[in-house]
């Protein structure tokens, strides 16, 4: 989830704990933690609501930092035929474990073996081996648009981005405003092979 302007600040300081979104289907899952532009949030609940039945005095309107129900409806984006969801969440304090993992440049033999095993499982998928080529491409072309990287590997952009997210979850890459770069852990892994 992304938050714009003052909403980003309100989520970051814990003042905003609800959001209304118009989506074709829910894009978040209750109980999961998501990295956002306002910090990490944990989803407490997700439920479909009828935007016409939102009342000015609903506590969730205030928790979303909206003046009234009309303000909520006015700010909804997306196809008007899509359902509206009320997402309740809270800010997760403390460091992101993925960032701590990504910052590790010294990998033990056990950590290297675990990484090799995980990446080998990824490489067994239907498109065949891709992890090393993707890491080397990101290393050689940091901050390059995902679509351009995907094209170099003859891949569609959306599945390529999902695969890079898998690498990120292992602490091997960082996402940038545009494109990616290898993390210290990713560089250490490539140096080891």
Image: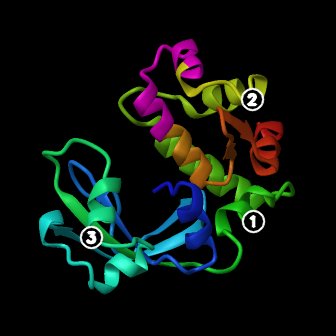
Work out which quarter of the rendered image holds the N terminus and state it: bottom left
| Label located before the other in sequence (1 or 2) | 1
Is 110 colored magenta in this rendering? no
- How far across and how far down the image is residue 124, in percent? 43, 36
- Residue 167, numbered circle: none
Q: Residue at x 71, y 27 (%)?
A: 136
Question: Mark 2, mark 3: which one is toward the viewer?
Answer: 3
For the residue carrying disc 1, how many other residues have a C-alpha within 10 Å: few (<14), some (14-19), or many (20+)? few
Q: Which residue is mark 3?
A: 69
Towards the viewer: 69 or 106: 69
- How far across and how far down the image is residue 117, in percent? 57, 50
Residue 75 higher or lower than 119, as above or below: below
- How far across and how far down the image is residue 167, in percent? 59, 45
Distance between the Cα atoms at labels 1 and 2?
Answer: 20 Å
Distance between the Cα atoms at labels 3 and 1?
Answer: 41 Å
| Main SS, magenta residues | helix
Q: Which residue is mark 2?
A: 142
- How far across and how far down the image is residue 193, in percent? 76, 36
Q: Quadrant of residue 10?
A: bottom right
Q: Which residue is mark 1?
A: 100
Q: Which residues are magenta?
A: 148-162
Image label count:
3
């Amino acid at each position: 989830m992304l938050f714009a302007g003052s909403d980003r600040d309100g989520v970051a300081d814990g003042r905003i704990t609800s959001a209304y979104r118009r989506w074709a289907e829910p894009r978040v899952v209750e109980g999961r933690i998501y990295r956002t532009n306002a910090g990490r949030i944990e989803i407490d609940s997700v439920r479909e609501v009828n935007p016409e039945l939102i009342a000015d005095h609903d506590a969730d309107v205030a928790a979303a930092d909206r003046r009234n129900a009309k303000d909520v409806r006015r700010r909804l984006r997306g196809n008007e035929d899509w359902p509206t969801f009320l997402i309740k969440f809270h800010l997760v304090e403390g460091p992101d474990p993925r960032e701590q993992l990504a910052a590790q440049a010294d990998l033990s033999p056990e950590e290297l073996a675990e990484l090799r095993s995980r990446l080998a499982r990824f490489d067994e998928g239907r498109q065949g081996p891709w992890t090393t080529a993707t890491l080397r491409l990101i290393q050689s072309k940091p901050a390059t648009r995902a679509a351009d990287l995907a094209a170099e590997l003859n891949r569609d952009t959306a599945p390529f981005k999902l695969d890079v997210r898998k690498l990120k979850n292992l602490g091997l890459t960082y996402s940038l405003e545009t494109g990616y770069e290898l993390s210290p852990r990713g560089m250490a892994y490539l140096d080891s092979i």
